[in-house]
Image: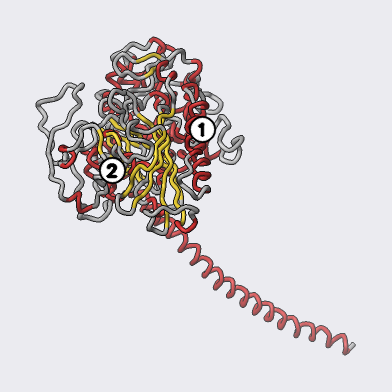
Amino acid sequence: MESQCKEEPVLHIVVVGFHHKKGCQVEFSYPPIIPSAGHDSHTLPEEWKYLPFLALPDGAHNYQEDTVYFHLPPLEGQLKCVYGVSCYRQMEAKALKVREADITRETVQKSVCVLSRLPLFGLIQAKLQLITHAYFEEKDFSQISILKELYDHMNRSLSCTSLEGSQIYLGLSARDLILHFKHKVLIIFKLILLEKKILFYVTPVKRLVETLMTVLSLFPGIIEHGLADSSHYQPRRSVSEDFSSPEIISADEESFCMSATDITDIPKELECRYDVSDQPDQSKPCNTALDTHYLQPHTGSLLDSSECEWETLEPHVIDEMEEKVDIDHSEMFDTVSGLPITVQPQSATGQGTLTSGLVSGLQEDQYGLPLAIFTKGYLCMPYMALQQHHLLSDISVRGFVAGATNILFRQQRHLSDAVVDVDEARIQIHDPELRKMLYLSTADLRFADYLVKHVTENKEDVFLDGTGWEGGDEWIRAQFGLYVHSLLSSALQEDHERLLADYGAAFTSAWKITHNYRLWISNKHPAMAEITPGHPFQGQYSVADVKIRLSHSMQNSERGKKIGNAVMSTSRSVVQTGKAVGQSVGGALTVAKSAMSSWFSMLGQPTAAVSASPQSTD
């Protein structure tokens, strides 16, 4: 960490443009990415060959501006991931003061990106967005002095101390995440703990990367110190590249634009995959049917089967599998409010000095966090270009958390374990066994309901738009921090099976064979003795739990949705029919009332005449 702090945090300022013949290419870099090539060279190191396609995303022409977060693998001789932030804009070519000869289209599309050693995505984006706007307002892209000033300014203002505190989470709203996904946030959280292949999908890119990084911000220390090894992959080499220089390639000589027809020409390869650090079970045959390595055209409709959702699993299927333990946990609950007494974990400043993990190599606190999830071939790619599609089936990649905007990624369901549709707040999981692992236990449902209630109830009352404590962003991250601390503490106890049952027996069994758990359990963490074991929301089953379970099933199971829609449809019909009947009945009653009044008045008139006639005779 000390050596990293001594180095300048910003590596390069890069401008990427779209050329009508050559496609996406680097037009300017400061300092030069390859020192001997100059500022305006298009050449790139082999490890960074995908940089143009990450900085200027697919489908960018559909938006006036956009923002991209991305990761690059370390260059030769380096060990840490490189974090990229790109601000994209487009403008009409006729508005330029100086129009170069190669600008032949009506619009000009360019991205200004910062390559950094520190994962300060939101902080960098806030500064970069202003500079990108000013750069375009010049209407002369040869004016690069502002970009050099940006490089100097960022290296003066950013440092490793910026990783401490809440500014690292700038632009990552945990409140908005809970409001949008509700209890499903916990399911995504558990998917990452299980190190599954998870694909986030939505457009534009800004919403995609912010959602993905907000989910990661719920894991203690992951963004600050847990992504250093998250982009260690080898770029794919083509036949033409085998005859070129092994160190650098030129974008002038080769365009990396790839169409859907190119994908169909790629042959299939069926290979077995396992983590080299794990103990392989040689008795189990390799499933070649699921190990398809390359994108293929999808013949069916796009995710047409509603049965692929995890919510279709009926509650009673798992309830029969869960162990029901009747133990008095009254001291875990407040007798007045009925809410769990949750002790918040200490802040980052109070956790002591970070040390380098003996096995993981990550900077860890006294609790052994962050967990070594994004290590050993488990990738984190906030945005993934189409040119990187082969990584999803690479034998050296054991899993990933990736974001994509291209529909081809979403269509290839066999390449991922779960697809998170951000726009619809839906998680699509194809494996029934995985859906069982992710089925939320009663304690998990209490936890999720606790979060949702506090966020929604304080929606209008949180001081300064989400910066308040209870129901605010930091409060939500503290709750997930407590969840992880309690989970780890429970795993250390002698009666861990009973304690872990509240997290889901199927989930904990699968989690215990993951890479992150085995690395964490292999070391001693004396500070974990301070953490109370057991689920924060453990306790006896009550009527309130039945309501939560029923609400959860009705809102999220396929059958529950159909029943809910039928009830709503029936209610509307009843209301409409009631109005029609009311109008008819009301009209009839009015007529009847009028008739009765007339009849009584008619009856009264003869009586009055009879009584008057004797008076007159008298």
**Above or below — where is 200 with respect to 362?**
below
Q: At which x and y percent is residue 496?
A: 32, 18
Horizontal side of 481 relative to 471 (left or right) equals: left
Q: Residue at x 43, y 52 (%)?
A: 63
Number of the front mark, 2 or 1: 2
Q: Residue 544 or 431: which is nearer the viewer? A: 431
Q: Which mark is residue 473?
A: 1
Bin the neighbour count of mark 1 within 10 Å (Cα to Cα): few under 14, some 14-19, many 20 and up.
Answer: many
The quarter of the picture where the N terminus appears is top left
Which residue bears the numbered disc 2? Answer: 251
| Residue 50, quarter of picture | top left
Horizontal side of 272 relative to 575 (left or right) equals: left
The CA distance from mark 2 to mark 1 is 43 Å
| Residue 596, quarter of picture | bottom right
**What element does badge 1 sit on?**
helix
Q: Which mark is residue 405?
A: none
Q: Residue 342 or 283: which is nearer the viewer? A: 283
Bin the neighbour count of mark 2 within 10 Å (Cα to Cα): few under 14, some 14-19, many 20 and up.
Answer: some
Proximity of marks 2 and 1: CB atoms separated by less than 8 Å: no
- Figure disc tally: 2
**Above or below — where is 262 with respect to 79?**
below
Q: How is the image coloured?
A: secondary structure
Q: Can residue 320 be seen in the rendering of this structure?
A: no
Q: Residue extending furthest right? A: 618
**Above or below — where is 307 with respect to 157?**
below
Which of the two discs, 2 and 1, labels the residue nearer the N terminus? 2
Q: Residue extending furthest bottom? A: 617
**What element does badge 2 sit on?**
loop
Q: At which x and y percent is residue 104?
A: 37, 58
The amino acid type, in three-letter code, at marker 1 is: Asp
